[in-house]
Amino acid sequence: MDLSRRELLWMLGSGATLLGAAAAAQAATPVSAPSSALTPAAAGGVEAPSGKISTVPVMSDPTKIPPPISRNHSVHHQVEFEAVEALGEIEPGAPFTYMTFNGQTPGPMIRVRVGDTVELTLHNKRNSGTWHSLDLHAVYGPGGGADDLTVLPGQTRAIAFKATYPGAFIYHCAVPGEMDKHMALGMFGMIVVEPEGGLPHVDREFYLGQNEIYTKQPPGSQGPREFDFERMLAENPTYVVFNGVYRGLTGPHAMKAKVGETVRVFLVNGGPNLQSSFHPIGNIWSRVWLMGSFVMPHMRFLQSVPIPPGNAIVSDMDLPVPQTIKLVDHAMSRALRKGAIAEIVVTGPEHPEIFRALPTPKKS
């Protein structure tokens, strides 16, 4: 029995249970084997010999993104995603169940060029606890692809689409009734459709995803985290994070660059509710494509840029002096207390003509 999205909605509306529908679908629908190219984290946790719950890494590496596109012709891409429910750590000693694409949050960046075609396959692991889907804001089609990419546990579905307009766009899970929760748990990412001619050259690129996480336990406390649905409805997050983890991209996990380089930051705001005010402390956005638009002229020398939920930004920085740049949501309580901070450590020679500390003035 291959249930359509419309049938699933009817079953949910009529009081039928999703797990019952899933069981029926598993019994009658063959499960496609995951691609060997996928390396998803194992879902759930297990009891380690020490008695502690073992977890898997879910924080996406901000440097592992596809390279810029330099070709002047269109190609066909095959992209495979797997919906993975994974037990990670939102902070040390705090296990938390995430929902992810390919075991990471944000999900992998898709990078194509205007005119390219994409064949996208979505698997849902047989042991998943719920259904998942995929809505891409770069797609002309029913639900941004979600109507045909709704998968019960054990199912696999696919779509093909043409990238007809340029920009940086979000993709996310879009199951009815639970879309906000799935996005809060990490099920979102970015698809970049480069314009003809590509983007201006930079020396380094980083990929970040911001979202809110709602738990019953506060930051800093020990033990597992439990999702808080009421806090989500009140739009009062416990955490606001980059790449799924409280202050995860700081200290030993900070990004790295060198004096004299240019860097580009792709940031997608998975929300599900709050707007970001994205600011680099100690620097300025030297070139910004607001709302991820490559059609409108880029803006220059912006301090904090707005990123509504379900949107993206592409922003460049020059690095004239050594320092640790703190990328923050300038709604400062989120940065100071809820985790919305990442770091870029810039090393290299001093340039006192641009910045220097002066001797302490003598008291008169």
Image (spheres, rainbow, N blue to C red):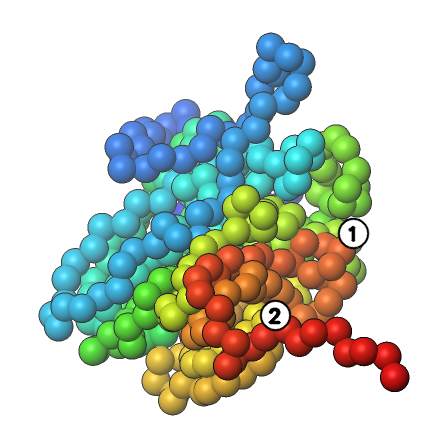
Seen at 33% across and 57% down, the residue is 110
User: Which residue is label 1 attached to?
Assistant: 230
Please tell me whether mark 1 sits on a helix, a strand or a loop.
helix
160 left or right of 179? left
Q: Residues within 10 Å of mark 2 (few under 14, many from 20)?
A: some
Q: Quadrant of residue 30?
A: top left
Seen at 46% across and 59% down, the residue is 347
Which amino acid, mark 1?
Glu
Q: Residues within 10 Å of mark 1 (few under 14, many from 20)?
A: few
Q: Does residue 156 appear in the picture of this structure?
A: yes
User: Which residue is label 2 attached to?
Assistant: 281
Looking at this view, is 30 or 250 the one in front?
Answer: 250
Whole-angstrom CA distance, mark 2 to mark 1, is 33 Å
Query: Looking at the image, is mark 2 or mark 1 nearer the viewer?
Result: 2
Seen at 27% across and 37% down, the residue is 37
Seen at 72% across and 37% down, the residue is 225
* Looking at the image, residue 22 lies above or below residue 305: above
Q: Does residue 181 appear in the picture of this structure?
A: no
Q: Quadrant of residue 77?
A: bottom left
Whole-percent x, y for residue 247 in the image: 63, 50
The circle drawn on residue 355 is none
* Looking at the image, residue 226 lies above or below residue 324: above
